Structure formats: structure tokens, C-alpha cells
Amino acid sequence: MASAQSQEDQVLEEETSFVRILTLNRPRQLNALSAQMRYETDSNVKLLILKGKGRAFCAGGDVAAVVRGINEGDWISGAKFFSKEFILNYLMATYTKPQVSILNGIVMGGGAGVSIHGRFRVATENSVCNTALFLVIKVFAMPETALGLFPDIGASYFLSRLPGFFGEYVGLTGARLDGAEMRACGLATHFVPSSRLALLEEALYKVNSSDPAVISAVIDKFSLEPYLKDHSAYHWMDVIDKCFSRRTVEEILSALESESTNRADAWISDAIQSLKKASPTSLKISLRSIREGRLQGVGQCLIREYRMVCHVMMGEVSKDFFEGCRAILLDKDKNPKWKPSKLELVNDNMVDQYFSKINDDRWEDIKLPARSNLPATAIAKL
């Protein structure tokens, strides 16, 4: 197996006949961009495998560094960071060759973007992650509302396409899903016991085909249907749909509290507490984003989310992103002081601002690369 190591161990590249393996070192996953584009035009490459290094493949982007830059008066650098990340997400969502992402570790936030958009996403019993084509999952979560942010990286596209209103539940509460739950809701395409991962990788290295059916058949040989734990919220999809289909966050919270008077399910009380602890502004823009995502393609979702994240970094409406990072990532007192502090103080006009273009001469809408004549296997992977 040939191996090439890029500068500063940012991305490790390996070759095995018709397969290319990228091992991404957090937080340098964006450096996979050039390699991906190179492999897509190489006729000798049939399959791309993405792997993470370490316990957590990626717990999201380096948001602390972004915040430090903004505090120094440089929000444009943060915009450039997110622009590169979203372009990578778009390329993975529209990639024309089979990708298998093996993400054996905890995956949250931005880490989801380098996983869920792929063709095959494989979960295990003790690892969580999202991947482009192949996913190994231990814990999946979208914790952005607790940080004063919102589910980005195209999340309004893939969360809105989960069964019923499960995407609203995951996106608003930041609920953690294990591998079985990811398989049940469709975030994962396969479930492979961790004891079989080495054998699966070995089998994939021998693949000489770009046919998704062939790749899927290889993974199928090592897959099984996992056991969904008794306490999993997915067992109560009727309640989730009843509550999270409501028009506003206030109505969702009220519906959950009403349900809690009739049942003592832990997932309901956890959801209520998560919503009450999250940034009110983040909750409202997140719900609207997911709802708009139901009617948009992945490219449209990423363009809109880029506008939203730029507004978040500018902090004209709310500075909750900075406060969330302070409380959760920097000082770690886990006691953010949100402003506005209550849902009823966040009006529709405030929410509207996050979906508008930025009034700054230095800013421009994200320019996604042209992707023409895409085969059916390169779109609608969820």
C-alpha cells in the first residue's frame, strides 16, 4: 500500500490499486478538498474511502479559533473558513464516485458535514459519525443551538429529509443518536459491528468498481440490523411528529410539556431541558432553516446557511455565538447568558435578518463549484 503524507500531517493519502484512502487529522479536514477533486477526474480511481484519526473523527470545526479572530475584528476570516467548509460539503454531496467514510469516533456539528452527505454511511455499536459514503458511528449530534449557532454544513437539507419531524427533534435539541438510531432514521445506510470493520476495510480495498450496487453488496456482507434500545426516542415517532410539527418553537415546547404530564419518558424531559437551555435566537433560526430546507436542494441550503452563519459571526442581532463559545468551549462554566433571554423576545423581524444578504462591501455570497451532468447516484443520497 503506497502512502503519501501532506504537509503538517494534515491529510494522509494511501493507495491500493483502484482505491484511494484519505485519513483526515482534525481539524484539518478541509485539506481533503484538493485530493477529492483530483481523484474524481482520475479514471484509475474507482472508490474513495475517508477515515478519521483518533477517538473523535471531528467534533466540529475549530469554532474557538473563529471566535478569537472575530474578537480581534476579523470576521471575514471566519467567513472564509465556513466558505471552504461548505464547498467541501457540496462536493461530497454531489461527488460522482462512490465514497466510503469510516468515522470511528464521536462526530458532532461540522464533523457531520464530512460524512452524512456521502453515498454510504456505516454505523457501529460504539462509534458515531457521518460520512460521505461510508460511516462508522459512535455518537451523532448537532449541538449548535447550545453554542448559539444553528445546524449548518447542509444540515437543513439532510435533517429535513429524515422521517416525519425527527430532523426538527435532532436539530433543535441536539439529541445524541447512537449507531442503531442512525440506521433506523436513515442517517446511516448500514450497521457494521466494530469487530468486523477491519475485514470490511480489507474487502473494500480490493474493489475494482464504481458501481454503487457493488459497493453496497460488499458492505452488506458485514452488516446486520442493530437492536434499537428500549429508551430510544425513535420508538415514539408519533409523539415527536405531534410535537415537532408545530409552527413555532414556543408551540413545540408547549406540546412537549403537555405530553410530559401524561408520560414520564426520559427523552421528553431531556428534550424540554435542552430547549430551555439553548439560545432562543438559535432555536428560532434553526427551525426556520430546517423548514425551508424541505423545499430546497443541497446547494440552495448551503448558500442560505452561509448567509446565516455570516450574520451569526457579525453579531448584529445577537451575540449568542460568542457567549455560547465562552461558556461551553473557553471558560467552560456551562452557564451562558443569552440575549435575548426568552423565546418571546425574538421576533420575526430579527429572524428575517439572518436570511438576508450581508450589507458589507467585503462580503459576497458563497460560490459553489459548477457541477453539471451529474449522475443520479451523485444526488439525493439520503
Image (cartoon, rainbow, N blue to C red):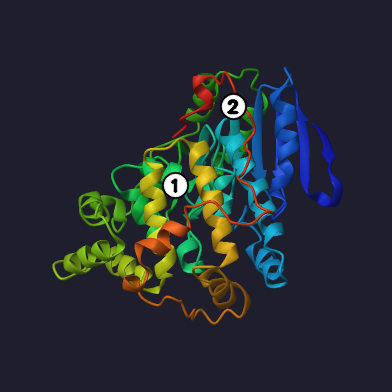
Considering depth in this image, is 5 or 118 the residue closer to the camera? 118
Above or below residue 301? Residue 310 is below
Instruction: Say what amino acid the circle numbered 1 marks.
Output: Ser
Residue furthest to the left: 262
Considering depth in this image, is 178 or 253 the residue closer to the camera? 253
Above or below residue 113? Residue 108 is below
| Residue 161 location (% of width, % of height) | 38, 40
The residue beneath circle 1 is 156
Q: Residues within 10 Å of mark 1 (few under 14, many from 20)?
A: many
Residue 369 is left or right of residue 303, and the answer is right
Can residue 47 be seen at all in this image of the molecule?
yes
Considering depth in this image, is 1 or 275 the residue closer to the camera? 275
Can residue 192 be seen at all in this image of the molecule?
no
**Mark 2 element type:** loop
Q: Which mark is residue 98?
A: 2
Above or below residue 39? Residue 71 is below
Q: Quadrant of the C terminus?
A: top left
For the point 59% across and 27% down, which residue is it? 98
For the point 49% across and 39% down, which residue is it? 300
For the point 55% across and 37% down, which residue is it? 134
